[in-house]
Amino acid sequence: MSLKFYRRVAFGLSPNDKQDKDPLSWALSQLNSIPDLLWPGTIPTEKELRKKYGEWVYGDREVLRKKFKNDKHAYKKAKDELRIKTGERYFELNEHAIRHYQTRHSTQPVFERFWLFWGNHFAISEKDFLAEFSTGPYQREIIRPNMVKTFEEMVLSVTTSWCMIHHLDNSESFGPNSKKGMEWRETINENHARELLELHTVSPNAGYTQEDVIQLAYIMTGWSHKWSRKNLETGDVWFDQEMHQKGDKIVLGVKYKNDAKRELAKVIHDLVTHPICIKFISTKLCRHFITDEPTQEMISPVIEAWNRSNGSLTEIHKAVITQAYKYNETTHKFHPPEIWLMQLSRMFDLSIPLSAEKMNYAFKSKPTSKQRQLSWILREIGNSPYRAKQPNGWSDFEIDWVSPELLLRRFWFASIELPILVKSENNSHDFILACLKNNFEDYENMASLIHQFRFGTSDKDLGRKYGVICNLPGVLKV
Amino acid sequence: MNCTRRNFLIGGSTTLFLSGYFPKISFASMKKKNLIIISLRGGMDGLTAVPVIGDKRLKKLRKKLILEDVLKLNSDFGLHPKLEIFYKLWEKNQAAFVHATNIPYTGRSHFDGQNLMETGAHIPYKEKTGWLGRGLLASNIIGQGLAISLPMPLLLRGVPQNNNFFPSPDFVETKLIDQIYSEFKGEHNELIKSTLDTIRQRPLSMQIATDSDDRKKLALEAAKQLKDQSGPRVAVFDLDGFDTHTAQGGVDGAHADELEEVNEIVTILNENLGKAFDNTLILTLTEFGRTIKQNGGYGTEHGYGSAILMAGGLLKKSQVYTDWPGLKKKELFEGRDLNSTIDSRAVYNSAMAVCFNQDPEYLRKEVFWGDELTDLSQELFKI
């Protein structure tokens, strides 16, 4: 078994991590339970942050815009103050810190890799102020607890979460024959229904039609945030009967009797047990861990595990890891920038994220450049996790991540930014050699490439060493 | 001639490098023609960008999306007021629009639709290359595509050595890249290796250390490159945010903000290409238009037919080129969307033929599998 398995399914080995005699058991044993979040700093709840979101939009939209409608400069100043007060420029930075601290220190790194996977499968793309206030807590409170349940439970939680409902506009979807729909002459918004089919469950391979999308949107009408003057769109999610389309609905040939809020769970049950859904998501999982174009042979055991366990995510994850282990020597997988960064951080004991004390925010002034550092790096290497451009999230294909500019960004990071993140006690050449030995079979060859810089300890020298080793084929890929 | 990483390193002996990498055209005898594509992701609403004038039905269905202060193009069509550069160019015969057009895709999925608008194919995800990449390859134009984005868009894939750029925070030592280059061996490292080749050959000027959020600088740099006779001939810009399910608005809404970005890019290109603008064609690309009717959130849903915005000196004249299908219920696609009566790919094929000096018939076979695509070169472009 080669050492690359630790990077294929986790983040490599830190100087404190030990190689295991039985790497497969090591990996499988990490999937039974949900590891605690380790970040010693603030971990705000989804509800708290939604309240902040509400304070921000209410303060800006309802108060400041009216108050300063004739004074652009005063408006700008007041808005900046509100930003600071509500943490609008801060919370995303804190979320990145929580996330990266977790992948850096977790004793169940394999579980964390699946956490990243599901957060991206049920992606929240850049919209309104979700990245600032909501996507992080959604990852922690909606995605994470469901990872030891069934896929069905996960889909139901995600679909009725405030974050996803806001992201895909379901609060703006009215059954045309519902009480409110008739009164206000409103109609459906298909966005959420379409993505529930296309991205989250069955994929276009299921051959659904426009009519299926409309019918599913009817079923979903009513699942919305509870609007109030003070909360605006940040109220809790509820089922508003007065928005719900009356009558029976038919999706993919199955009839759903008029049954108000219970219709959604029924249709989700049928979608997640659809063979095409199971195949679609099993393929995606194999693509993430094994190779861009997984073969039927690779995918089949995952589908079997899915069917055998009625969609238990723990069992599905174990099957994926078993396959990743089986094909570890014969396949290659390119890692997107964020996972690459997480691996460098763990393997070379980098000082990211910033310490919890230093991340502490006083709500009195703008976040400091140090506090912004990790988020800035993520953006510059092209992979700010909570700002995917579209609801299909970040790509898992190598071809989408290899362009001159994206590769140059990795060189830039490793040779210029990374040296600043090397802890002073890790300055020596021997430290690098030890890390290489811990993680790569061909560490001698890697070491020979940086041998000429062995006496240097300045940031520039470190940059020359890390610039080379972090961008070698065996580091960009497993 | 721009200084590249490679010849910068070897210090002046540029001819050695040049001989291998430049196409077989004589710069002196033929002016370079530029083709610039701006991808408008999310579904650009053709009826917001180029609205029909005086259609009562549209007014009724889009009560909250009414456009005031529309710039009048002709008796039938207006222009969104945020697209003012197009209006200025229209008066000089350097702007035109194709309306009620789309790629032949009616599925209304962004991701399938964007895949098809870039591959030009019929089945999503089947083709791995873009129509522009294939067009460049078929025209033997290698290493002259430039993407103004971090990832390489699918549209340009299919021809090797394309470049992309986006200002980065700092410079990278050339030595570093040279040092690791030879480590990339084997078939599974081919893609990275060829991308490293491109990096090694790119002009040093393309590494701008600046704030990458500054779209103006990007367009400016692109103009600089395109203006250079030996620089790229094709550039691709990527914009997103056209998916306005809510608060689409009229003159000032979410869609207007996006159109303003298009306007800004075209303005900068126009100002900075100078004379080269006369030999340039700018076209937009989107995956679908939007529904006629506004939805529950004063936005619109995914639709079908849209419009192509065009600018540049290679246009034949200012015109709204369309075979207008009408907006009555029975004239709409599936009773809800503006229909498409012109296959957008016919426009793109003709544009490539003009810009790459190729026979449209040849490109149609090489790039679009011989699909039925009318040659529109005569109607739309200067030949």
Image (spheres, coloured by chain):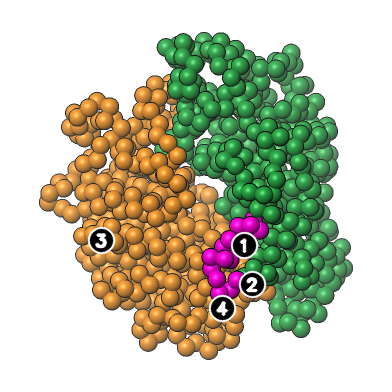
Between B369 and B51, the one lying in front of the other is B51
Residue at (23, 63) in percent of width and height: B278
Q: On screen, B256 above or below A444?
A: below
Rendering quarter of residue A395: top right
Visual hue assigned to chain A: green
Q: On screen, A58 above or below B209?
A: below
Q: Marks 2/1: CA distance?
A: 10 Å
The question of residue A73 being in magenta is answered with yes
Rendering quarter of residue A331: top right
- Which region is colored magenta? A66-83
Dot 1 falls on a residue whose secondary structure is helix
The question of residue B250 being in magenta is answered with no
Residue at (79, 52) in percent of width and height: A48
Dot 3 falls on a residue whose secondary structure is helix
Q: Are marks 2 and 1 in contact (CB under 8 Å)?
A: yes
Q: In the image, which disc is placed on residue A67?
A: 2
